[in-house]
Image: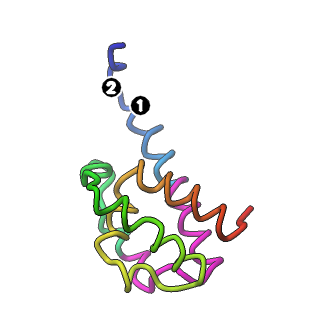
Amino acid sequence: MEPLPSSNLDLRTHSQILVAELGNLRNYLIQLGAWPEAGDALLDLIPLSRWDYIPLTDSDYSWLPSVVKDAANGKDIGAHYPSFFQKLLTNNDLRQMFLSELKKQAYIQ
């Protein structure tokens, strides 16, 4: 399957989806008391054009259960796992896995 041609509409739609996903992540973590104090400032520093640039490693997958557990328990994951938190903001696959597991553990609607 060939990729769709890019257009300004595609970029705007992609940006809107990312903003909505990050908004959901932010709201869930705020609800649990796990959103970092500097989380909003970090979001402001990440340019839309660079999202998804940080590739996942085996280490990210191994850290995922611990980070989800701590987030579900209200720990500031930005303070405890700064590199993971940055990847969480910038990598769509990690963000989706994290949110899926967090919803299971924290019973978030």
Relative to 7, does residue 95 appear above or below in the rendering?
below
* Other-residue count near label 1 (Cα within 10 Å), few / some / many at <14 / 14–19 / ≥20: few
Q: How many marks?
A: 2
Q: Position of residue 88 (x, y in %)?
A: 39, 62
Q: Position of residue 54 (x, y in %)?
A: 25, 54
Q: Could you say which disc has been placed on residue 48 in the image?
A: none
Q: Position of residue 50 (x, y in %)?
A: 26, 51
Q: Could you say which disc has been placed on residue 6 in the image?
A: 2
Which stretch appears magenta?
Answer: 21-41
> Residue at the location (60% across, 76% down)?
72
* Quadrant hosting residue 11: top left
Foreground pick, 23 / 85? 85
Label 2 vs label 1: CA separation?
6 Å
> Residue at the location (32% across, 51% down)?
51
Name the secondary structure under disc 2: loop
Residue 74: in magenta span: no
Relative to 79, does residue 41 appear above or below in the rendering?
above
Q: Which three-letter amino acid code belongs to the residue tagged 1? A: Asp
In the rendered image, which residue does mark 1 sit on? 10
Name the secondary structure under disc 1: helix
Horizontally, residue 95 falls left or right of residue 61, namely: right
- Give the overall secondary structure of the magenta segment: helix
* Quadrant hosting residue 1: top left
